[in-house]
Image (cartoon, rainbow, N blue to C red):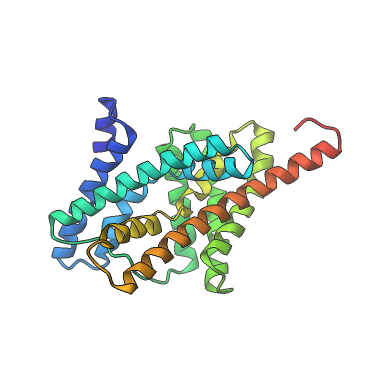
Amino acid sequence: MLRRLLGRFSAAAPLQAFVAATVAGIVGALATDWDIESAALVTVCPAMVLVPGPHVLNGAMDILALRISLGIARLGYATLILAAIAAGLIIGLGVGGHTLPVTGGAAEVSLPADVIAAGIAAGCYPIYFSMPYRMIGWPVAAGMAAHGLHWWTTTVWHLSLAGSAFLACLLVGTALIPVAYKLRIPFAGIGFAAVVAMVPGVYVFRALSGIVQLPSVTAPELLTATTSNAATAALIVAAMALGLTIPAHVRNAVLSRRGKPR
């Protein structure tokens, strides 16, 4: 609500994200003081919806398509917003005398709970992006299937997060690109809504928090965790972009061989 209120006054997107994330940081500091379980998630989860997932993925896909200048511009803009979010979280936590941890584990979640939560998230993001209601069903179905595959590959096959993200996005691209062209629905809308919840915002926030702490803390563990978070985030974004892009390139190549318009 605060972000939308600032938007009415023509505030820049990074400023909107910074102020909203600062509120999330203050709430996270209170949750830590009150010994609420998973206080770190209480801090980070409200900020995840602020993450510019489409800009990150679009930028990566532009670079893969050799639209270098446009890709760098989009990734630079997304990085600015991510930095604003991280700064807001860090400052909000700092008000309560806390910092954003650079490490943290994830609790195991059952497959049904993961799929249902993915469907809810995939249904919320189209509304957040002001998509028409008639388009919401496609990203919800694809997002639930993709997160189910993601859960299976990480839990059962013990695949890396980047590998699981690649397979999940490859499934979304394969399923939704024909739908997008057939029904004349923008793939950028339904495709990103299905997978944007996989954008590794948590790892980006932890990496930026570690960078802020490095000048005053020289522990090798902090440097290792910060580097690991940054590398994990970069690999996941690259894997997601590849997974979404490959089906489109395959479709265009097949149509070109048949002499049909793309």
Question: Who is closer to the viewer here, 78 or 160?
Answer: 78
Q: Furthest-right residue in view?
A: 258
Q: Position of residue 162 (x, y in %)?
A: 54, 62
* Residue at 85% over, 39% down: 257
| Residue 145 visible to the viewer | no
The residue positioned 63% from the left and 48% from the top of the image is 173
Q: Is residue 194 visible?
A: yes
In this view, the residue in front, 204 or 195, is: 204
Q: With 223 as the anchor, is 125 left or right in this view? A: right
Where is the C terminus found, in terms of image quarters? top right
Query: Where does the N terminus fall, quadrant-wise?
Result: top left
Q: Answer with left or right where residue 40 lies relative to residue 178.
A: left
Residue 111: % across, % down: 50, 67
12 sits to left or right of 98: right
| Numbered disc total | 0
Q: Tell which residue pokes out farthest to the top in this image.
A: 9
Image height check: is 68 above or below 8? below
- Between 165 and 226, the residue placed more toward the observer is 226
Q: Quadrant of residue 220?
A: bottom left
Q: Quadrant of residue 2?
A: top left
Q: Position of residue 68 (x, y in %)?
A: 57, 39
Considering only vertical position in the picture, is 235 above or below 23?
Answer: below
**Above/below status of 218 relative to 210:** below
Q: Residue at x 64, y 41 (%)?
A: 65
Residue 249 appears at what percent x and percent y?
71, 44
Residue at the (62%, 45%) spot, across then down: 64
